[in-house]
């Protein structure tokens, strides 16, 4: 598998290959960042492996990409904190969202909603209430019921009990286990709780450093306690007791005492009579090492650390020069001036050692605006002489075509230039630079520090909210939402399940940030000292001089095109 070398690239999975037999209850454990969550998002097509295959019920998940939605109904995925995806006005409608996307009739939808609500222990009286009026545990039940209502053959849960109290945790997991027993559904449970895995799972898959470290029965995996501890994981308390007893001569590895301690529960682990034994999922049985690269497409507002001259350049000068560059794009808007501006920008990206692919990523969000502006210039800027193209009442003149191209190039250069500032300057340093530049306004009682702080928080919230949007979209896609297909009106309507949870999430995060700042006794910038004081060095002045010379060359293009 090829590796894309980018500042924001990570190897998500590396040579991962395993089989899950139908009807199994598999626990997935691993340290933070080991690849657990990434692994499960491959199982219903939310992520596509760079190489290898995902086989479900004998069929290749990506053999026919246009049918990927069918697999999402087959593999139900419950994300961590699934209650954040709730959006409907009643619990009933939210649980019915998935079945309705499956095209079921209302009678079948009603039956599934009540059946799923019963499975998770949700009171019938709550179905007609708004999900936002419920407690955290009740919201969690509604979200899990929304996936169960689709009756998937494979149920994948990512920390379904995260954030719940011990009683709520036990209730949720017991209901999942009961659902597994009654329906024979294959269950994959991601958890950090070794006790939960030991109590509910039949087999355990251990992830470490993006690879599979172990995959065996619960008894055999937890019998290798020293290896688990070496991987940064824990073992159930009962296993620790057994190991201590073994040291004292009270047991032997794999013996009856160990099995009793690890597997004693009310549910047992017997197979359902006549259950079929077929491969359920084998993600990334890859050639070339099987590495799956998950690239974050979110670049706006992100900072990529480095030690280049652009990274080390004084942030105050960098900010001022960015503003001057933007002005220059409009002052020298002739073909030669824009060409020189682009050459300068490409050179800066090269010096900063930031891949040019990031430029296209930063432009993606505003491409519709660029195209719309170009079309307006193309059709509504008139010129002298005969039009190049005449269609109905629309005319395209050479002047309009020229302005459309120049406007598009100018806007793209503007976005790429400002993105370079955030790529090479951390939000904290940028905040200090803004505050230092605006410091003279403080004498006029202008809230300089507060303004700088707000701008810094806004920059940090952009990638956070985009990432949150991606999570919500994946959660709704897992329930059959069609966000990429259909007419314009259908797509706009399909965004409702995304926008409502996103707005709620934004307000929740803002409230949490405000409370955190209050708890840390934040009272503005008065009297605060700085860990690092901004000072210009000799290299900064040299860099400034080089930039000024380049800007003068760009501006001199007006002499070549004085009337442009």
Image (cartoon, grey):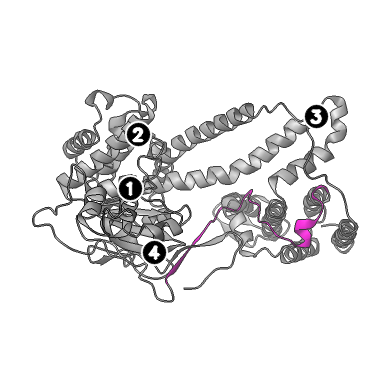
Q: CA distance from mark 2 to mark 1?
A: 22 Å
Q: Secondary structure at mark 2?
A: helix
- Along the line of sight, the residue nearer the viewer: 450 or 211: 211
Residue hosting label 1: 241
Magenta segment: does it hold 77?
A: no
Does 109 sit left or right of 35 as displayed?
left
Residue hosting label 2: 166
Point out which mark residue 529 bears.
none
- Along the line of sight, the residue nearer the viewer: 398 or 549: 549
Q: Secondary structure at mark 1?
A: helix
Point out which mark residue 527 bears.
3
- Along the line of sight, the residue nearer the viewer: 250 or 304: 250
Q: CA distance from mark 4 to mark 2?
A: 29 Å
Give me the residue at 18% from left, 51% from top.
269
Q: CA distance from mark 4 to mark 1?
A: 24 Å
Viewer-side label of 1, 3: 1
Circles 4 and 3 in contact, beta carbons < 8 Å: no
Q: Which residues are magenta?
A: 290-316
Whole-percent x and y of residue 354?
A: 67, 63
Viewer-side label of 2, 1: 1
Give me the residue at 64% from left, 55% from top.
378
| Outermost residue toward the bottom in this view | 288
Circles 3 and 2 in contact, beta carbons < 8 Å: no
Viewer-side label of 4, 1: 1
Q: In the figure, 345 relative to 2: above or below?
A: above
Circles 1 and 3 in contact, beta carbons < 8 Å: no
- Along the line of sight, the residue nearer the viewer: 227 or 517: 227
Residue hosting label 4: 213
């Amino acid at each position: 598998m090829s590796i894309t070398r980018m500042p924001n690239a990570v190897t998500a999975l590396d040579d991962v290959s395993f089989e899950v037999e139908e009807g199994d209850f598999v626990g997935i454990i691993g340290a933070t960042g080991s690849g657990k969550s990434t692994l499960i998002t491959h199982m219903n097509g939310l992520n596509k492996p760079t190489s290898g295959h995902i086989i479900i019920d004998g069929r290749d998940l990506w053999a026919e990409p246009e049918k990927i939605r069918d697999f999402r109904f087959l593999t139900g995925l419950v994300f961590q904190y699934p209650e954040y995806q709730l959006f409907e006005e009643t619990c009933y409608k939210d649980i019915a969202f998935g079945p309705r996307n499956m095209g079921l009739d209302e009678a079948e939808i009603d039956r599934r909603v009540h059946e799923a609500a019963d499975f998770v222990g949700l009171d019938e009286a709550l179905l007609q209430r708004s999900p936002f009026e419920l407690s955290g545990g009740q919201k969690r039940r509604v979200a899990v019921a929304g996936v169960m209502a689709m009756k998937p053959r494979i149920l994948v849960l990512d920390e379904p009990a995260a954030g719940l109290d011990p009683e709520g945790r036990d209730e949720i997991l017991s209901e999942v286990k009961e659902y597994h027993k009654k329906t024979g559904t294959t269950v994959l449970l991601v958890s950090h709780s070794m006790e939960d895995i030991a109590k509910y799972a039949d087999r355990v898959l251990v992830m470490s450093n993006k690879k599979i470290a172990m995959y065996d029965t619960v008894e055999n995996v937890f019998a290798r306690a020293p290896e688990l501890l070496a991987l940064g994981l824990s073992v159930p308390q009962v296993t620790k007791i057994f190991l201590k007893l073994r040291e004292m001569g009270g047991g032997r590895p794999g013996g009856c005492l160990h099995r009793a301690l690890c597997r004693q529960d009310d549910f047992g682990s017997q197979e359902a009579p006549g259950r079929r034994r077929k491969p359920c999922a084998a993600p990334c049985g890859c050639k070339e090492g099987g590495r799956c690269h998950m690239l974050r497409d979110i670049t706006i507002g992100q900072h990529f650390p480095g030690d280049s001259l652009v990274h080390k350049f004084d942030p105050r000068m960098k900010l001022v020069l960015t503003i001057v560059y933007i002005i220059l794009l409009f002052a020298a808007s002739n073909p030669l001036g824009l060409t020189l501006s682009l050459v300068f920008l490409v050179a800066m990206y090269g010096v900063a050692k930031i891949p040019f692919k990031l430029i296209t990523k930063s432009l993606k969000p505003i491409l519709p605006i660029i195209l719309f502006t170009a079309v307006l210039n193309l059709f509504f800027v008139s010129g002298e002489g005969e039009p190049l193209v005449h269609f109905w009442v629309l005319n395209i003149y050479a002047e309009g075509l020229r302005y459309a191209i120049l406007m598009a190039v100018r806007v793209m250069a503007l976005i790429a230039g400002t993105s370079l500032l955030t790529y090479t300057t951390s939000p904290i340093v940028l905040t200090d630079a803004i505050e230092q530049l605006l410091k003279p306004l403080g004498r006029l009682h202008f809230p300089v520090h507060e303004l700088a702080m707000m701008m810094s928080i806004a920059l940090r919230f952009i990638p956070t909210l985009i990432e949150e949007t991606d999570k919500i979209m994946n959660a709704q896609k897992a329930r059959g939402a069609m966000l990429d297909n259909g007419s314009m009106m259908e797509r706009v309507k399909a965004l409702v399940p995304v926008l409502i949870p996103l707005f709620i999430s934004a307000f929740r995060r803002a409230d949490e940030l405000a409370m955190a700042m209050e708890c840390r006794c934040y009272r503005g910038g008065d009297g605060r000292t700085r860990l690092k004081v901004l000072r210009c060095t000799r290299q900064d002045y040299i860099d400034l001089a080089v930039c000024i010379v380049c800007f003068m060359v760009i501006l001199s293009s007006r002499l070549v095109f004085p009337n442009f």
